[in-house]
Image: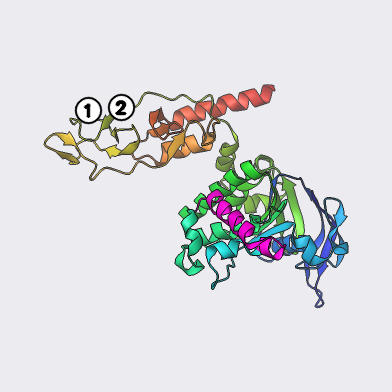
Amino acid sequence: MIEFRDVTKRYPDGTVAVDELSLSVEAGTITVFVGPSGCGKTTSLRMVNRMIEATSGQVLVDGQDVAKQKPAQLRRGIGYVIQQAGLFPHRTVLDNVATVPLLSGWSKAKARTRASELLELVGLPVEFGKRYPAQLSGGQQQRVGVARALAADPPILLMDEPFSAVDPVVREGLQDELLRLQAELDKTIVFVTHDIDEAIKLGEKVAVFRVGGKLAQYAEPAELLRAPADEFVSSFVGRDRGYRGLGFLSADGIAVEQLETVPVGAAVPTTNDWVLVVDGERKPVGWLRPGSSSTVDGTVTADGLEPGGSLYDVEGGNGTTGSLRSAMDAALSSPSGHGVAVDGSGAVVGRVSAESVLAALSKAREQAATA
């Protein structure tokens, strides 16, 4: 557990970066610090490993005041991931990951074995260990940064806007990877971001800071969206917080209806409606528009199909039922108006509509009211 007890950071010029912060980060959870620039979220994070010293108050890790511990010893039990990965450019990827174990007295062979295991854990081929950071993409470098932070198996992981420098697609993949790793490793993670969507996706609890280093609200994401503490939090979370809140409602009662599909190479169906084209494993390829020219000699081809929009995974990607938000997004983003529902392997199982999502939402609200 990490505890902040009335922690203040005041600089010599009188600037207050953090103002009497009090909160507890439960062990084995992801807690996200979020807020606008200059709100003290990164300062708060860095006081945990004493990269910044508190002016007053206490920061405790597992009940021990960090101010009474030697910084080097303290940091051996705390992994640290920053923006742009911060890798050593003239060391190979393997040696970058092995850095902390070597500093902790591990043999070179043991440290490199551990580094190879971690590259696989974060989704990188072992052969990448022979490359240098400049030979990797931004997303790959961030994965190496996470692997390096995990190398000595620290119980605590501090992450300071680690995914903000990569493009949205890579960023989403890194977020998913972090959630997968956490399900396996059960670390205590404090994650800093300025992106409320990232905070809501990753955080089991979210701390919203306002400018001046004041904690505005500390709550679970669903509560943050449902009941913002004040106008500042409401504004920061955004006007579409009701839509975001659908991500915390299960879609287990949603109606998945039959969807007409046709495999690539089959005869063009005689219908005036949109038809979903699938491959040999029933995975969606795209939509065949009514009257489309995406045919050759009367058979369907994969060329010229309409993109399908997002997919609704009925298993939620981890063996659980998906959310109402993912179902609604699939329906709204589809050019046909039919959201494509898929199973865990990506094969089509049917369709969902915006109307069916709203019906499920109404049912969920009725059940909550009578609970």
Quadrant (top left, top right, bottom left, bottom right) of the C terminus: top right
Would residue 314 be visible to someone looking at this image?
Answer: yes
In magenta segment, residue 82: no
Q: Is 345 situated left or right of 232 in this image?
A: left
Span shown in magenta: 100-124
Q: CA distance from mark 2 to mark 1?
A: 10 Å
Residue annotated with mark 1: 271
Residue toward you, 356 or 54: 54
* Left or right side of 200 for 334: left
Residue 238 visible in rendering: no
Label at residue 294: none
Of 136 and 251, the residue lying toward us: 136
Q: Earlier in the sequence, mark 2 or mark 1?
A: 2
Q: Residue 149: which quarter of the image?
A: bottom right
Please identify the quarter of the rendering in which residue 116 is found. bottom right
| Residue 216 x/y as whole percent | 74, 53
* Residue 316 locus on image (x, y percent): 52, 34
Residue at the spot 17% in from the left edge and 39% down from the top edge: 295
Q: Nearer the viewer, residue 190 or 151?
A: 151
In this view, 96 is above or below 365: below
Residue at (47, 36) in percent of width and height:
328
Q: In the drawing, does residue 290 fall left or right of residue 27?
A: left
Amino acid residing under circle 1: Thr
Q: Are marks 2 and 1 in contact (CB under 8 Å)?
A: yes
Mark drawn on residue 260 = 2
Q: Residue 306's spot in the image, x, y percent?
A: 29, 43
Q: Nearer the viewer, mark 2 or mark 1?
A: 2
Which quadrant of the figure has residue 55? bottom right
